[in-house]
Amino acid sequence: MWYLYILRCGDGTLYTGITTDVEKRLEAHRVGKGAKYTRGRGPLEVVYREVCGTHSEALRRELAVKAMPREEKQKLIENLKLL
């Protein structure tokens, strides 16, 4: 099972990625073994996760979310909190 996730970085920026284990990937980001973008931007917090199914579905969803303006990403995050 693949997941799309969004991290909120310490500087307020958002990072979007995919993984099969969100908690393990968060820890990799926190110790500097994740994406280069997240290094030095801690603390990092998972603010959104979404089940995507297959790897190819997750990649397509990641591209779609990364193309969204920040405001749309914020809406995704806020809608999750309302559930």
Image (cartoon, helix red, strand yellow):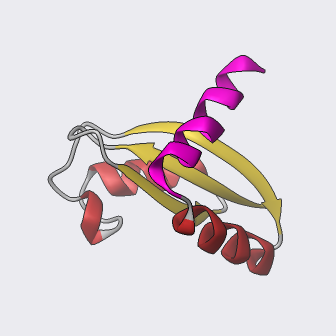
Specify whether 80 is left or right of 38: right
Residue at 53 percent across and 66 percent down: it is 66
Query: What percent of the width, then of the height, locates residue 14?
Result: 39, 49
Specify whether 57 is left or right of 37: right
Residue 7 lies in magenta, yes or no?
A: no
Residue 70 lies in magenta, yes or no?
A: yes
Query: What percent of the width, then of the height, locates residue 10?
Result: 23, 38
User: In what quadrant of the picture does the N terminus appear?
Assistant: bottom right
Q: Residue furthest top?
A: 82
In the rendered view, would you say 60 is above or below 26? below
Query: What percent of the width, then of the height, locates residue 48?
Result: 59, 40
In the rendered view, would you say 81 is above or below 21? above
Most foreground residue, 63 or 10 = 63
Specify whether 62 is left or right of 60: left
Q: Residue furthest right?
A: 53
Q: Residue furthest bottom?
A: 56
Give the tally of numbered discs.
0
Most foreground residue, 47 or 33 = 47
Residue at 72 percent across and 18 percent down: it is 82
Query: What percent of the width, then of the height, locates residue 18?
Result: 59, 64
Most foreground residue, 29 or 41 = 41
Per the rendered image, the range of residues in magenta is 69-83
Name the chief secondary structure element in magenta.
Answer: helix
Residue at 50 percent across and 56 percent down: it is 69
Residue at 37 percent across and 57 percent down: it is 28
User: In what quadrant of the picture does the C terminus appear?
Assistant: top right
